[in-house]
Image: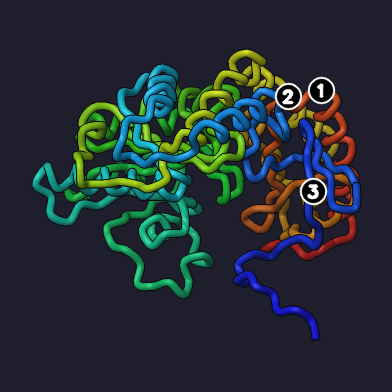
Amino acid sequence: MAATQPLMNTYGRQPLAFSHGEGPWLYDTDGRRYLDCLAGIAVNTLGHAHPKLVAALREQVARIMHCSNLFEIPLQTRLGAKLVELSGMTNVFFCNSGMEANEAALKIARKYGHQRGIERPEIVVYERAFHGRSIATLSATGNEKVQKGFEPLVEGFVRVPLNDAAALERVAAERPNVVAVFLEAIQGEGGIQPARVEYLQAVRRLCDARGWLMMVDEVQCGTGRTGKWFAHQWAGVRPDVMPLAKGLASGVPIGAVVAHGAAAEMFQPGNHGTTFGGNPLAMRAGLVTIAAREEEGLLENAARLGERIMSGLRRGLAGTPGFVEVRGQGLMIGVALDRPCGALVKRALDAGLVLNVTADTVVRLLPPLIFRDEHAEQLVATLVPIVRRFLEEGAPAAA
């Protein structure tokens, strides 16, 4: 009799397991090598087995991994100071994941509203957004498929389309209880949909005029992936609240909420907390990851290689029926097709590429920031014929 699967059925996993990695390469348990174009969904910033990260984590594990936030944690202070320096903001709260960081941001917004005398504060959120899977972050998410079965959702959210300044102006005119706008600088799970520069600037102006908090979710698009430390910096704006996670510590679980102004003062002892957040191991990983980005020029590398990959994909897929566009910024890239393309994940694996599909019709590429020119060339040369062949087979277009 076959053994019972002990894991809950929460993932549609591919039928292979990776045993180890090196740089941008992953190796499965049969010894086959794959070019990692997903980086653990934007997590493995430094690729795999980066020597500086490995050495630092070994040393930290031998010293202290966890002590709780009942005590001072010097590494936490150091990483917080670095994030403040890079963001131009003032204070940081550390947690363990993007979902937790976004949950904390929502709590900041509600407390901000209550302090302004608004009994039932509302937060503007977006169609196609994804902020996590807790009940509150799920309610802020703009995807009915992942919400279904978990109703009733949390109230207090007002949803608008991305990049529609007029819709946001209408909310401002009609909803006096709004206290914050919460958006991703680039929607990841929503299909690599960037907020336009002029839209982010318009949000900042409206938030200033109305006394709202501008909260920018940089969980997937932040920490250097787009070629700047944070994706909103391309628009020359500064949010009031910025959740971070994923690539901040190159694979060690971490989350952070960076804030300034009134938002930075919302939490007082007893308002919020975490058992594991800000532990010495995660803080050391975050510091080493940031240092490696600086020392190895990884932001500039992401901007340059991202443009090279996107240009190559556009040239290779131009004129192919079913190809819509390539979009993104830096090493956060989406190849949009006119039909569901989940089958491309397995085809890419068979060709030695690790990637995934998001929003049903978008091939998502999130390579580690240590990618080099030869890796970019291999990605384009391998992916273009796979996509062309898939489209030429004539799978039905999306409705």
Name the secondary structure under disc 2. helix
Q: Is residue 278 above or below residue 15?
A: above
User: Mark 2 = which residue?
Assistant: 305
Say left or right for 188 vs 204: right
Q: CA distance from mark 2 to mark 1?
A: 7 Å
Q: What residue is at 28 percent from the left and 62 percent from the top?
A: 155
- Is residue 237 visible to the viewer in this orientation of the structure? no
Q: What residue is at 36 percent from the left and 41 percent from the top?
A: 68
* 159 and 279: which is toward the camera: 279
Q: Amino acid at mark 3?
A: Ser
The residue carrying pointer 2 sits among few (fewer than 14), some (14 to 19) or many (20 or more) residues within 10 Å by Cα, namely many
User: Mark 1 = which residue?
Assistant: 373
Rendered location of residue 1, percent (x, y)? 80, 86
Identify the residue at the far bottom of this view: 1
**Disc 3 + disc 1, Cβ < 8 Å:** no
The residue carrying pointer 3 sits among few (fewer than 14), some (14 to 19) or many (20 or more) residues within 10 Å by Cα, namely few
Say left or right for 312 vs 112: right
Q: Quadrant where the C terminus lies?
A: bottom right
- Is residue 124 visible to the viewer in this orientation of the structure? yes
**Disc 2 + disc 1, Cβ < 8 Å:** yes
Say left or right for 393 vs 76: right
Between discs 3 and 1, the one toward the N terminus: 3
Rendered location of residue 130, percent (x, y)? 49, 52
Q: Amino acid at mark 1?
A: Asp
Q: What residue is at 65 percent from the left and 20 percent from the top?
A: 298
Occupied quadrant, residue 256 = top left
Rendered location of residue 316, percent (x, y)? 85, 36
Image color mode = rainbow
Say left or right for 156 vs 293: left
Rendered location of residue 264, percent (x, y)? 26, 32
User: Mark 3 = which residue?
Assistant: 19
Between discs 2 and 1, the one toward the N terminus: 2
